[in-house]
Image (cartoon, helix red, strand yellow):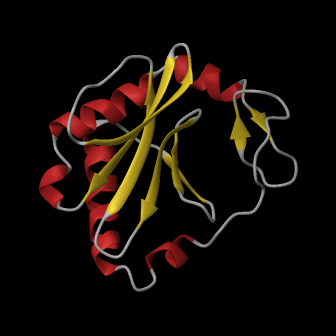
Amino acid sequence: MKVALKIATLWKCPKCGRQFMRKNQSHSCRMYPLEQHFLSKEGGKILYQKLCEKIKDKVGPFKIESLECCIQFVSTFTFTAVKIFKDKIQLDFSLNHPIKNKRIKKLVKLSAHRLLYFVEIKSEEEIDTELITWIKEAMDKK
């Protein structure tokens, strides 16, 4: 019931139909065919599919919004963005606390209480409990 109330309060862009937490939130209305992300990138596609399966199984349902820059995983907000490469994928997600881990390839401080993390995945084994825990936390952020 709590989720239904949240979804009911989302603002829906009249042009593209995407939903956002804030009215008139700045965004791109230009959607991109999902399959375009995978052209000549079979290894990346396999990793992406494995990631989707694990998140749906361990975290819960989410929407996919395919933009030219990336594939976004969305609940009531974008909680993870994925870029597809030939033999790897790159994820970014934000949390409100620091993570010290060699898997973090890049860190950007978005604000005093929000950090954006970048992680590269090169094998299915890297889509593990630790990664899924970070993604679940990003999805559950307030």
The residue sitting at the left extreme is 125
- Residue 59 placed where, x, y %? 32, 36
Please say if 74 is above or below 136. below
Please say if 87 is above or below 56. below
Left or right, 54 with respect to 116, comes to: left
Q: Say which quarter of the image contains residue 55.
A: top left
Q: How many marks?
A: 0
Residue at the image position 46 percent from the left and 83 percent from the top: 39
Residue at the image position 42 percent from the left and 66 percent from the top: 84
Q: Nearer the viewer, residue 35 or 84?
A: 84
The residue sitting at the bottom extreme is 40
- Residue 46 placed where, x, y %? 28, 70
Q: Nearer the viewer, residue 23 or 63?
A: 23
Please say if 141 is above or below 136. above
- Residue 104 placed where, x, y %? 29, 40
Q: Nearer the viewer, residue 36 or 85?
A: 85
- Residue 49 placed where, x, y %? 32, 63
The residue sitting at the top extreme is 112
Q: Nearer the viewer, residue 66 or 116?
A: 116
Please say if 13 is above or below 6. below
Residue at the image position 54 percent from the left and 70 percent from the top: 34
Residue at the image position 59 percent from the left and 25 percent from the top: 4
